[in-house]
Image (tube, rainbow, N blue to C red):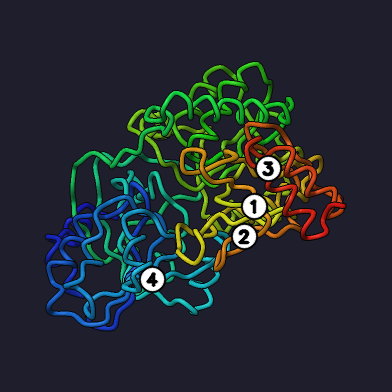
């Protein structure tokens, strides 16, 4: 596209958001691609608007649109509840939609969730006019492809990440230019107390014992994935097919541990949909042909995941019951996060040749005062992953393999990896329920 036509689309943020009218549904780009200039300009207009629905998945930025004074003007529909909006959801000031990450695109494409306006943050266009979705593709590419109007915040510091991760400048209606650093989300373990870190290290060691050479991994963010990485340095020919990854993966790639050479689906590529990371990783994935980003409807599709032989999925839990039901998105009836990609990857890994779906978590919560392994889930808790889907559970006390086990065998396995201080109590409950005799 000629530069003159590009320049014709460039406007100030307050001008760009004037196209939004009452009753519209607006999609916000997620993670470190959150288009804060556009969002702030929209929030500044709140008194002029009514019943504007805002839809997004994970965000880490300030969420002005959920402030009490903006009720009636904006309504948030969170497809994944992150910390910035959790309080509003649980106070009934915002909505939450439970949905698998792989199926959010289906909601958009089927017009069950039609998008009027899509807010994006993109890289500058290349010589052919293509802008990269940068560090976060997820469902935002699908949202843009089905939106009536696209407003893009073009950031000169946004990496150009390769893959099915581009939009042509001709598709964009309004452009707001900026040049500022992306929000960084550092690795978690730097802030974890030493005793807690030892627990995660034990969990990481147990997980690594199930990972063999030539395996393909799903690894997310958090203390557990970070704790696994140091144990993988002696492995060979690992691949990555994952919803997202963070900074720790760089070392394994540079050591040659992760090369994707033995992957049976999309070999020689690190396949993902977004990163939650720091500038070190943003710079590393910029124009890197090893990295391929695609929408979550592709990356998280269990059928695509299963096309990787030797697939390992690593996910976590808030609470797990005796029989293997996993709650990972709520604390009782109170929403905590969302389905995300846990079930997508558990099912994909389970159907992979030699695949291993893993749920890993510390055995206790609240400084050791509560067991995460319980006779039954808390009242109102959601079942994220069913007992029919699970296979391996891991805590700092070991590995429980539940696949094909009876309820009695499952209970024994789960008590075995629970914290020793809670085992007698758990066994007493199991006998009361006639799970053991």
Residue 386 placement (x, y as % from top left): 70, 60
Q: Secondary structure at mark 3?
A: strand
Foreground of the two, 14 or 392: 392
- Asked whether disc 2 touches disc 3, contact meaning CB atoms under 8 Å apart, the reply is no
Other residues around mark 1 within 10 Å, as few (<14) / some (14–19) / many (≥20): many
Foreground of the two, 303 or 421: 421
| Dot placed on the residue nearer the N-terminal end, 1 or 3 | 3
The residue tagged 4 is 77
The residue tagged 2 is 377
Residue at the image position 42 percent from the left and 77 percent from the top: 114
| Dot placed on the residue nearer the N-terminal end, 1 or 4 | 4
| Dot placed on the residue nearer the N-terminal end, 4 or 3 | 4
Q: Look at discs 1 and 4 and give the one toward the viewer.
A: 1
The residue tagged 3 is 358
- Asked whether disc 1 touches disc 2, contact meaning CB atoms under 8 Å apart, the reply is yes
> In screen coordinates, is 245 left or right of 260?
left
Q: CA distance from mark 1 to mark 4?
A: 31 Å
Q: CA distance from mark 1 to mark 3?
A: 18 Å
Q: Quadrant of the N terminus?
A: bottom left
Q: CA distance from mark 1 to mark 2?
A: 7 Å
């Amino acid at each position: 596209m000629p530069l003159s036509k590009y320049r014709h689309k460039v406007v100030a943020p307050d001008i760009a958001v004037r196209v939004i009218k009452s009753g519209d549904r607006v999609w916000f780009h997620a993670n470190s691609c959150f288009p804060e200039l556009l969002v702030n300009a929209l929030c500044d207009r709140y008194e002029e608007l009514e019943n504007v629905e805002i839809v997004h998945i994970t965000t880490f930025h300030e969420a002005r649109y959920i402030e009490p004074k903006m009720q009636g003007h904006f309504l948030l529909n969170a497809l994944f509840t992150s910390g910035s909006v959790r309080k509003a959801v649980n106070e009934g000031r915002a909505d939450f939609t439970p949905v698998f990450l792989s199926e959010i695109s289906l909601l958009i494409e089927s017009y069950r969730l039609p998008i009027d306006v899509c807010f994006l943050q993109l890289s500058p266009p290349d010589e052919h006019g293509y802008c990269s979705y940068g560090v976060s593709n997820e469902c935002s590419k699908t949202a843009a492809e089905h939106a009536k109007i696209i407003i893009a915040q073009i950031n000169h510091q946004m990496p150009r990440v390769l893959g099915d991760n581009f939009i042509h400048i001709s598709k964009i209606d309004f452009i707001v230019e900026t040049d500022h650093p992306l929000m960084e989300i550092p690795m978690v373990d730097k802030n974890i107390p030493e005793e807690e870190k030892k627990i995660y290290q034990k969990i990481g060691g147990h997980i690594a014992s199930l990972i063999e050479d030539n395996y393909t991994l799903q690894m997310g963010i958090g203390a557990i994935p970070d704790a696994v990485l140091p144990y993988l340095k002696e492995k060979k020919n690992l691949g990555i097919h994952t919803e997202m990854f963070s900074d720790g993966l760089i070392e394994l790639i540079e050591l040659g541990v992760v090369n994707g050479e033995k992957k049976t689906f999309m070999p020689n590529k690190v396949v993902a949909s977004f990163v939650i990371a720091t500038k070190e990783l943003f710079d590393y994935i910029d124009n890197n042909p090893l990295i391929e980003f695609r929408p979550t409807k592709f990356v998280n599709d269990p059928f695509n995941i299963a096309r990787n032989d030797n697939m390992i999925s690593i996910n976590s839990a808030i609470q797990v019951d005796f029989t293997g039901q996993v709650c990972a998105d709520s604390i009782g009836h109170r929403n905590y996060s969302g389905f995300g990609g846990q079930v997508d990857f558990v099912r994909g890994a389970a159907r992979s040749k030699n695949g291993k779906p893993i749920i890993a978590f510390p055995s206790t919560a609240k400084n050791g005062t509560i067991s995460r392994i319980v006779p039954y889930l808390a009242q109102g808790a959601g079942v994220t992953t069913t007992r029919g889907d699970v296979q391996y559970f891991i805590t700092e006390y070991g590995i429980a393999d539940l696949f094909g086990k009876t309820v009695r065998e499952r209970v024994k396995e789960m008590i075995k990896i629970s914290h020793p201080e809670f085992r007698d109590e758990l066994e007493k409950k199991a006998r009361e329920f006639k799970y053991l005799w």
